[in-house]
Image (spheres, grey):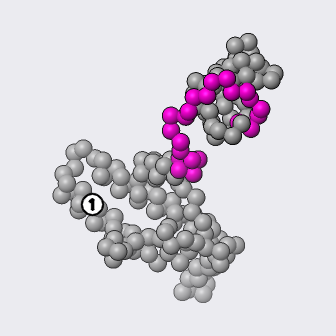
């Protein structure tokens, strides 16, 4: 079966008999069979199509995934997976006090990097909550946005840790580009 079936398509399965597609997933169909009830059937299984209904929309998995990631970034506290630059993997940050009588503090770079990414994600959530706030005036929102932009600018030092430039922090200079 080469073509994607839409909800409502009638099919004949070699083992389960006649049925109707009730839901389309990435790799399987939920099909309600007359005598067997609802079963999940892999899309590549040999189904005889009795009546084909075109899907209502044709969205690739990648397009759906990108849309979901955008929604999650905008409206939730979910932390995205941001890759650490290759040269920093298994690296170690050593904080050495000026006082020789005190011990060094060692922090794995990936642990530090994770904290930086969490900080950025929380700033994004704060930004969204400010923009969506119903009581703040536009002037208040603008003022708070300027502080957040300055915070991003202060964090540009850590851009060296990111694998992809698209993940970098941007301050006021980067906003105009």
The answer to whether 75 is drawn above or below residue 34 in the figure is below
Q: Quadrant location of the N terminus?
A: top right
Is 92 or 40 nearer to us in this picture?
Answer: 40
Q: In percent of the image, x 63 and y 37: which residue is there?
A: 4
Q: Would you say residue 107 is visible in this rendering?
A: no
In this figure, which residue is indicated by the disc labeled 1? 144
> x, y percentage for residue 19?
68, 19
The answer to whether 91 is drawn above or below residue 124 in the figure is below
Q: In percent of the image, x 66 and y 31: which residue is there?
A: 29
- The reply to whether the magenta stretch includes residue 60 is yes
> x, y percentage for residue 136?
22, 49
Quadrant of the rendered structure where residue 174 is?
Answer: bottom left
Q: Residue 48 vs residue 100: left or right?
A: right
Is 102 or 29 nearer to us in this picture?
Answer: 29
Q: Would you say residue 10 is visible in this rendering?
A: yes
Which stretch is magenta? 43-64
Q: Residue 148 vs residue 14: left or right?
A: left
Q: Describe the element under mark 1 as helix, strand or loop.
A: helix
> x, y percentage for residue 104?
63, 79
Magenta-drawn stretch, dominant element (helix, strand or loop): loop
> x, y percentage for residue 18?
71, 18
């Amino acid at each position: 079966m080469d073509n994607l079936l839409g909800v409502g398509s009638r099919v004949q399965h070699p083992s389960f008999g006649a049925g109707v597609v009730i839901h389309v997933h990435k790799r399987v169909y939920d099909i309600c069979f007359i005598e067997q009830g609802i079963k999940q059937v892999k899309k590549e299984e040999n189904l005889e199509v009795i009546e084909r209904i075109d899907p209502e929309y044709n969205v690739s998995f990648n397009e759906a995934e990108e849309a979901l990631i955008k929604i999650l970034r905008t409206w939730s506290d979910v932390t995205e997976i941001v890759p650490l630059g290759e040269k920093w993997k298994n690296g170690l940050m050593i904080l050495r006090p000026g006082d020789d009588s005190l011990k060094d503090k060692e922090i794995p770079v990936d642990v530090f990097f994770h904290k930086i990414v969490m900080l950025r994600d929380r700033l994004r959530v704060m930004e969204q909550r400010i923009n969506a706030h119903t009581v703040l005036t536009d002037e208040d929102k603008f003022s708070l946005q300027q502080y957040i932009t300055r915070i991003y600018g202060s964090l540009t030092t850590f851009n060296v840790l990111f694998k992809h430039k698209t993940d970098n922090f941007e301050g006021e200079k980067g906003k105009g580009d």
